Amino acid sequence: MYLILVSLIIGLFVAMLFVNVYFRVKVMKSYKILVQNRVEFGASHLFNKQKMEEEIYPKYPEQKENIETFVNHMQYSIKMASVLAALITLFGGVLMWYRYDN
């Protein structure tokens, strides 16, 4: 049981790590396009769609699609990082629990 559980957690961890790296690469590509076009906005715009629509999109209408792509990839990457942190915690907890059991 221990081996199956640890293998499952390690497999999930590795899968989430690769998904996270994949989306980080996508974020960096989108970021590069925005930097080349001198698009600027703050972190508060990332998480507030209404603020983004009111302040940033009118300023850079030709870059709306690139901005949306960047924001979506960034939010997804943050979610994946949170799941990755939870898996690391779970993995550590399982190892500690079985360490005291045996």
Image (cartoon, grey):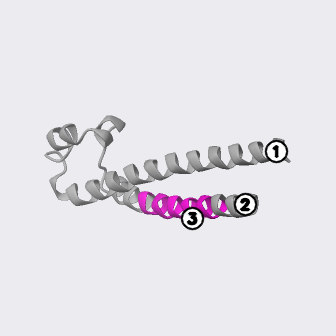
Residue found at x 32% / y 35%: 44
Query: Disc 2 to disc 1, how far (Cα)?
Result: 13 Å
* Residue 93, horizontal then vertical, whole percent: 69, 43
**Of labels 1 and 3, the one closer to you:** 1
Q: Amino acid at mark 3?
A: Ala
Residue identified by numbered label 2: 1
**Occupied quadrant, residue 28:** bottom left
Closer-to-camera residue (58/101): 101
Say if mark 1 contacts mark 3, CB within 8 Å: no
Q: Earlier in the sequence, mark 2 or mark 1?
A: 2
Residue identified by numbered label 1: 101
Question: What range of the chain is rendered magenta?
Answer: 10-27
Query: Disc 2 to disc 3, how far (Cα)?
Result: 21 Å
Q: Earlier in the sequence, mark 2 or mark 3?
A: 2
Q: Earlier in the sequence, mark 1 or mark 3?
A: 3
Q: Does residue 59 appear to the left or right of 67 in the view shown?
A: left
Closer-to-camera residue (83/54): 83
Can you tell which mark lies on residue 15?
3
Q: Does residue 93 appear to the left or right of 81 in the view shown?
A: right
Per the image, label 3 sits on a secondary structure element best described as: helix
User: Was residue 24 drawn as part of the magenta stretch in this picture?
Assistant: yes
Q: Amino acid at mark 2?
A: Met
Please indicate, yes or no, whether residue 41 appears anywhere in the rendered image. Answer: no
